[in-house]
Amino acid sequence: MRWETFPHMADIGIRGFGKSPREALIAVSYALIAVITDPQKVDPQKSLTLCCEADSYDLLLYDWLNSLIFKMATENMLFCRFDITLNLPVLRGIVWGETVDREKHSPAVEIKGATFSELFFGQAKDGQWIAQCIVDV
């Protein structure tokens, strides 16, 4: 499982790779956090449960990322650990993190939301799963 970020005009792309859809979702979740701060700077002090439902993998990815962004904004948290159960059309996740500490985390940007731009969640020719999206910052 690995992840990366990539530039996209005024926004930022995030991409997660995995051997399964679940692994790719976890990886892209780390990429989302990495846009804001180094995920290793975040401690798993509190957990939250999230649930999303959508008819396709692409829409499930979009909903999952926006659920994470919403929880980060409303709970003033950053996340560092993700446990996901995926049975299309339902995704259930437990996320761990802590309250944002501006000195400790030095947040680089505030993510406004996931977009449909370059949204992709599927299997590559080599069998690897890829979850990617552009996030509005």
Image (spheres, rainbow, N blue to C red):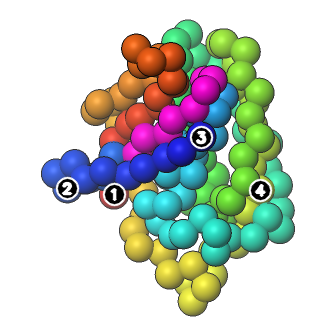
Residue 59 visible in the picture: no
Work out how far the residue at label 4 is from the one at label 1, CA to CA, in angstroms. 23 Å
Work out how far the residue at label 1 is from the one at label 3, CA to CA, in angstroms. 25 Å
41 part of magenta stretch:
no
Query: Callout 2: few (<14), some (14-19), or many (20+) C-alpha neighbours within 10 Å?
Result: few
Work out how far the residue at label 2 is from the one at label 4, CA to CA, in angstroms. 29 Å
Residue 117 visible in the picture: yes
Residue at screen point 63% across, 23% down: 20
Contact between labelled residues 1 and 2, with CB atoms less than 8 Å apart: yes
Q: Nearer the viewer, mark 4 or mark 1?
A: 4
Front residue of 45 and 4? 4
From the image, tell me which residue sits under label 4: 96
Q: Which residues are magenta?
A: 14-21
From the image, tell me which residue sits under label 1: 137
Amino acid type assigned to the residue bearing label 2 in the image: Ala
Give the prevailing secondary structure in the magenta stretch: strand
